[in-house]
Image: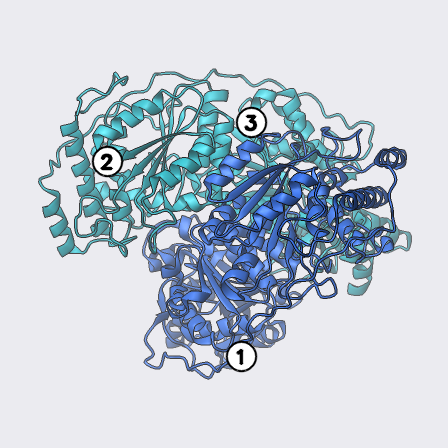
Chain colours: A cyan, B blue
Amino acid sequence: MKDAVKGIPGHKAGTVELEKLARLVRYFILTATTKAGSGHPTSSLSAADLLVGLMFTGLFRYTTENPKHPNNDRLIFSKGHASPLLYSLWTAAGKISVQELMTYRRFGSTLEGHPTATFRYAEAATGSLGQGLSIGSGMAMNAKYIDKLTYRTYVLLGDSEMAEGSQWEALQLAAHYRLNNLIGILDVNRLGQRGETMYGHDTGAYASRIASFGWETIVIDGHNFDEILPAYDKALESRDKPVMIIARTIKGKGVPFVEDKNGWHGKTLNKEQLEQALRDLGSVDTSLRGEIAEPENLYPEKKSSGSVGPLAYEDGKPVATRKAYGNALERIFPQFPDLVVLDAEVSNSTYSYEFKDAFPDRFFEMYIAEQNMVGSALGFACMGKIPFVSTFAAFFSRAFDQIRMTQYSESNVKFCGSHAGVSIGQDGPSQMGLEDLSMFRSVLNCVVLYPSDAVSAEKLVEEAARHKGMVYIRTTRENTPILYGEDEAFPIGKCKTLRQSVNDKVTVIGAGVTVFEALGAYEELAREGLYIRVVDLYSVKPIDIEALKWTIMGTRAVITVEDHHEEGGIGEAVRSALAGEPTPIYSLAVRKTPKSGKPEELLDYEEISKNAIIKKTREVL
Amino acid sequence: MKDAVKGIPGHKAGTVELEKLARLVRYFILTATTKAGSGHPTSSLSAADLLVGLMFTGLFRYTTENPKHPNNDRLIFSKGHASPLLYSLWTAAGKISVQELMTYRRFGSTLEGHPTATFRYAEAATGSLGQGLSIGSGMAMNAKYIDKLTYRTYVLLGDSEMAEGSQWEALQLAAHYRLNNLIGILDVNRLGQRGETMYGHDTGAYASRIASFGWETIVIDGHNFDEILPAYDKALESRDKPVMIIARTIKGKGVPFVEDKNGWHGKTLNKEQLEQALRDLGSVDTSLRGEIAEPENLYPEKKSSGSVGPLAYEDGKPVATRKAYGNALERIFPQFPDLVVLDAEVSNSTYSYEFKDAFPDRFFEMYIAEQNMVGSALGFACMGKIPFVSTFAAFFSRAFDQIRMTQYSESNVKFCGSHAGVSIGQDGPSQMGLEDLSMFRSVLNCVVLYPSDAVSAEKLVEEAARHKGMVYIRTTRENTPILYGEDEAFPIGKCKTLRQSVNDKVTVIGAGVTVFEALGAYEELAREGLYIRVVDLYSVKPIDIEALKWTIMGTRAVITVEDHHEEGGIGEAVRSALAGEPTPIYSLAVRKTPKSGKPEELLDYEEISKNAIIKKTREVL
C-alpha cells in the first residue's frame, strides 16, 4: 500500500493509520449501538472502510469548524440507517465527544436514529431510502451551474435502496447534467432487511445498469484501502460524468460472528456479544483522531438584490393564476437572486417557462421525474438557494415521500402545483389535483397558499420567496378575473373578506376558483335581497383563526366550498380553525368521482358551483 | 411484406389491409379530437401503426363480447393521453360506434380524456405517466404464477414517461420474476410535452438501459409493418425474459404539417387543419372494420373457500397489531382464496412474512420499490385477486400517485402500513407514519381502519378482505394489550365505546395506541371521581356519525387524541362527523417535529399521552 494517495496532495493518513482509524470507527459503532440498544451496526460496519478512506486521507475537504462553509465537500448518507457510522466518523474526527456519541438515539440527542437537521454535520435528513442521490444531485448542480465552486458531493448508497425508482431518476438526471462533481459510493453488502437483495454480491449487475445510465463506474473491494483510495483518485479525474464507486462489502464486517449473516439487520449486540466483538476487533487506540483537510476558501459570487417591477394586470382581463406564477418568478428574481426554478417537463403548463426564457441559467429541466426534482430542490435549498419546483398539483403526489422528508431537513423549498381540481375540465380525473391541499397541509409547518386571481398569485409567490420554510402554492388552469388592486397585500396567514354587510345571513368561505363561484352566488342572491358574506381563504395554512372568528359573527351558518376532496381540505381546515364556535359549518367539496367535461359542468356535478352555493345557502337558512 | 405472420396462426390481416386500418384509425383519431376540441392526437398518431399491427393480426387475442374473460390478452395504455388511439382502435374493431367515439371528452361519456374504469375496454385507469408497466407486471405475474393462464399483457409506453423512476422499478421486478408474458411497446416519438426528451430519437439509449435491466429488447421502425409484425413474433418467443419493443416513431405521423414538430403536444387541429390533414391522409374506407382473434377459452382453477380457524390470543398477552396482521392473513386465506400478498422488503417488520412462510406461492417480494408494488397490486386486483400490500405507513407516501390512481380503476387493493406514529420510538421521524391517515382519507371511497389490539386487527383484516374496494389498515409497532373478546365484531363504519357512565364529563376519542392512553387516563381520573367516556374509533373512514353523536351526549367536551399530524387525521375526521353539534371538540395530535426517543417519552413530548389527556380533560372542564 502506498502511503501517498496519487493526485491528492493534502492526504493525511497512510494505510496503517487508516486501518487504525477504521478499527476505532468500528469500536465507536459497536459501543454506541449496544449502549442505545437499537440501531444498525452491521449496515454501518460494511461501509466503514469506504468512509474512513474518504474522510481521513485529504480527499474529503471540510472546514470542521464551519459546517456551513459553502465550499465544504458534501457527504450524504442516503442509507440513513448507517447513522452510527456517520456519528462515529465525526467522533473519530474529534468533532463530537465520546460522551455525546453515547447519547445516540436518546431523547433530546442530536444523534437520532436516522440523521436529521438537528445533527450539525448532516447535510440533509435521510432514512427514507433512495433519496440521498437526488439531494446530492441538487448540491452538485449548485456547485457546477450556480455557485461555480469546487466542492464535491459524495453520497453513500445502500444496495437495497437501488431498487427505488428515485435512484434511477437521479442517475439519469445527474448524467444528463454531466455532474462530474458527484460521486456515489455504493455499499454492496448483499443483505437487505429481510434477506438477500435482488442482485446479492453481483457488483457487475449494478455496474452494467449504472453505466448504461451514463455514469462512470469503478468496481472495488470495499474493505481494501489499496482499492478504495485509487478509486477515489480515479473518480476525481472524471471530466463530464458522475462516478459511482461500486464496492463489494461484507455486512457486519469486523465482527466475525455476524459477518455476511442474515437476521442481523437493525440489531445491536448485547453486552456479551459486544465483549466478544471487541475482542475480535483487536486493540483500539481510543485516543486516535483523524484529520480532515480544509477546502479551498472559496465563496460564491455575492449577488445583491435589486428592486422588482410592477404587476401588469391593469387591463383587468382574466388571467390564469398559473400564468401569474410564471410572471411572478420572472418579475421577482432581481429581488431574490437566490431563486432557482425546476420543472418536471410541464413548464409550458405551469408557466415556469417564463422564468426559463428570461433566466435560462437558473432554470433546470428535470423531465418527468418528480421525486428527483423534489430531492434535487432540497439539495439546492441546503446550499442556500430558494428553489421553486412546479408540476401539476396531482403529480406532486409522486414525490410525497420526498416532500415529507423535506420537513426534517428544515428546508426552504417552494412547491407550485398547477391544474388544481375538477375545474381543469376535459382531461379527466388523472390530471386533477384533488388531494394536494390535504397532502401539503399534513406536512408539519408547510405553508399552503391558494390564490384566486393573478394579483394575489403574484403577491403570494413573493411571500413564498420571502418566507423561510416550505410553501405550497396551488394554481388554476383556467383564466380567472382580476379581483384585487395591485397595491393589495397578501400576508401569509391572513384572508380577505370580499363581501360583507350587516344583513349577511351566511358566510361562504372559498379559495381559488370557488371564490368566483361564491361571488356569483352573492350576485344572484343579492338580487333577491339575501346577502352572503364572502371570504377568500388564500392562506389555507396557517389559517387566520382570529379573522375567521370575527368574520363569521352575525351570520347563521358557514359554508366552505372547495375544488378538492373534503378530507384534509379547506372545509376541515376551517372546522379546526373555528373549533368551539357555535355557528354550524357546512362543507361543499368534490365527493363524486370526477369525469371529463367542461369546467362548469364539473363544478355543478360536484356541487361546488355558484348554483350549489345558492342551493346550500337556501337549505341552511 | 408477407401476408402471413410467422408463428401467428390466427392472424387476420395482410399489409394492405393493415395500412387501410391504420388510415382508418388515424381518421378516427383526428376527427374525434377535433370534434372534442381537446386531446392528444399527435401522441396517438405516433403509436397507431404499432397498435394496429398488434390488434388486427391475430396476435392480440380477446373475446370482444366479454372484456372480463380471464384469458383475454391485456392491453394497457401507460401513455394514457393517447386515449384517442385506444378509442379509435375499438371503433375500428367495430366495438364502439362512430357516434359514441364522437362523444370523446364530453361530460357523461365513457370515453374520457384519459382512460378510466368507465371505458369497458380499459384494463385500468391511466394518465399519470409511468404507471402502466407496473399494472401490466401485476397482470403478467397473475398469469404466470397464480392463474396459470396463457394471456399476454401488452403495455404501450411513451418515451417521455421513461424518465419516471417507477418504470425502472417495474423493469427490474418484471425481469426478476421472468415475465416473458409481458411485452412493452415503447413509442419513441422524440417529443415530450414541452420539447425534446432526454434521449430524443436515440433508441439505442433506451435499448442499452432496458437490456441492462434484464429485458429482451427489439429496436424497430414503428411505422413499418415489415418490422412491427416480426418484432411481435420475436417477442412471443421469449422464454424467460420480458420483452421491450423499442419503436422509432414520428409524433403526429400521417399529418405532414405537424409531423415531428414541437408545440403540437395536447393540441387538436381546427376545422381547416383537419380538412387539410384528411386530404393528406388520402382515401379512407370508413366502413372497414378489423377483426380481433379469440383467446384460448381457459379459466383459472376455481378454488372454493374454506372456513377459517379461531384467533389465538386467549392468554391475553400483549401483541402488536402488525403481528396480528400477519396472523390474520395466514388464518383467513382459506376463506379468501383470491388473496395475494406483496411486501416491499420489510415483511419481517410488517409481519406479512407469516403469510409468506405459510403460502409462499401467493406471496411476492417486491423489494424496496413501493410504487411498483402498488401498481402491480392494482394489476392483480384487475384480474380478480385481493392483493394485500404492506410496508411502513410512512413509505406508502412513496406510492401516493399510484394509490391516488387506484381509485379511478375502481380497484380492490388493500394497504397495510405498519410503524404508525411517534410510538415507534428510537428510529426517529423518517420512519414514522404521521401523514398516512390524511393521505388515505383524502382518496375517494378509501376505507381507513386503525385497530388498537390484536383481536380488532385480525377482525379488521377479515373485514378488509370482504369489502369490495380500497382499504387502508394502520398497524402499530409496539405490543398492545388485548382489549377485546374473540367474538367481538368490528364492522367497517362503526366504533366502540369502551368506558361509559352517566357521570362522564368528557368524551375521549382515540384509535390505535391512543386508545390505551385514554384508558390509562380513565383509570387515573376515575380514582379521583372524574369520569371520562372512551371511544375506540377503529373505523376512521367511513366514520360512524350517528354513534358518535349519541356517544358524546351528556359530556361537556370531546377530546380527540391521535398519533398523527392534526391535519386530515382523526381530529378533523371527528370534527366533520360532529359538524353541527354544539359540544366543543379539542384535538391532541403530533404538532412538534418528533425526535428519537422511547415511545412513552415521545407520546408525552407530543402531548398525546395519558398525561396529556388528563391535563386536557382538566383544562376543558
Question: Mark 1, residues whose alpha carbon is within 10 Å: few (<14), some, or many (≥20)?
Answer: few
Marks 1 and 2: CB-CB under 8 Å? no
Which residue is nearer to you in this view: A584 or B598? B598
* B541 w.r.t. B155: above or below: below
Q: Are marks 3 and 2 on the same chain?
A: yes
Identified by mark 1, the residue type is: Ser
Kindly state the secondary structure of the residue where label 2 is placed: helix
The residue indicated by pointer 1 is B304
- Residue A63 is left or right of residue A212, and the answer is left
Marks 3 and 2: CB-CB under 8 Å? no
Identified by mark 2, the residue type is: Asp
Q: Given this view, does label 3 or label 2 mark the residue nearer the observer?
A: 2
Kindly state the secondary structure of the residue where label 1 is placed: loop
Task: Tell me the number on the disc at residue A49.
Answer: 2
The residue indicated by pointer 3 is A340
Work out how far the residue at label 1 is from the one at label 3, CA to CA, in angstroms.
60 Å
The percent coordinates of residue B428 (x first, y second) are 37, 50
Which residue is nearer to you in this view: B100 or B24? B24
